[in-house]
Image: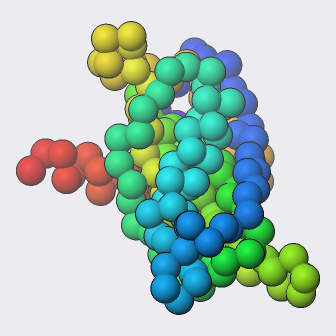
Amino acid sequence: MEEDQQNYPGLVAPEIRMADLVLPNQTNYYRTMFGGDAMAMMDKAAAIATLLFCRQPIVTASTEHIDFRQPVHEGDIIEALARVIYVSRSMLVVRVHIYGENPMQSNRRLCTTGHFSLVAVTPEGKAMPVKTKLLLEDEQAREEWEVGRKIHEVIQARRKR
């Protein structure tokens, strides 16, 4: 936990869920979902998870490693699960999983995983402190926090170049 966070109220980050149906205009000639459409849904889920966690204005600062593991097919129900996993002074790292499921076959599968960094901002667009500290409720939360910490370090190193 960052020292700036110690005087702020703590919260266990809620996992938010968003669902949609993959329509023909969202697919390529293989009838699988465009990666950009999946990323847009992931970014929106990350933003909602962040807003519900800190209740402050935020912007997406970067997308980090995104793994497209399995395709999401036309007609599938797509579900995004997003949770804040790490908080620094002004940045939050959010993990997003995308699941696809053919509603006629009940074959829910993990299709995509990615991490997004978002920054709390003032009305002028300047970074400001996140006023909620992240409480880690279990071992999984601690493991994800460590992933988020490493992602934060990579971002910081990249920005120094």
Residue at the image position 67 percent from the left and 77 percent from the top: 74
The residue lying toward the viewer, choosing from 136 and 90, is: 90
* Residue furthest out toward the front: 25
Tell me if 111 is positioned left or right of 68 in this view.
right
Residue 147: horizontal and vertical position, in percent?
50, 60
Residue at the image position 32 percent from the left and 18 percent from the top: 125
Residue 27: horizontal and vertical position, in percent?
54, 74
* Residue furthest out toward the top: 123
User: How are the colours assigned in the image?
Assistant: rainbow
The residue lying toward the viewer, choosing from 143 and 42, is: 42
**Quarter-of-image position of residue 51:** top right
Residue at the image position 35 percent from the left and 48 percent from the top: 62
Residue at the image position 68 percent from the left and 30 percent from the top: 52
With respect to residue 24, does 158 lie above or below? above
The residue lying toward the viewer, choosing from 64 and 36, is: 36
Q: Examine the rendering and report whether any part of residue 138 can be seen.
A: yes
With respect to residue 13, does 32 lie above or below? below
**Quarter-of-image position of residue 61:** top left
Tell me if 28 is positioned left or right of 9 in this view.
left
With respect to residue 37, does 153 lie above or below? above
**Quarter-of-image position of residue 8:** top right
Tell me if 72 is positioned left or right of 100 in this view.
left
Residue 88: horizontal and vertical position, in percent?
44, 35
Q: Examine the rendering and report whether any part of residue 141 can be seen.
A: no
How many numbered badges does the structure rendering display?
0
Residue 70: horizontal and vertical position, in percent?
59, 85
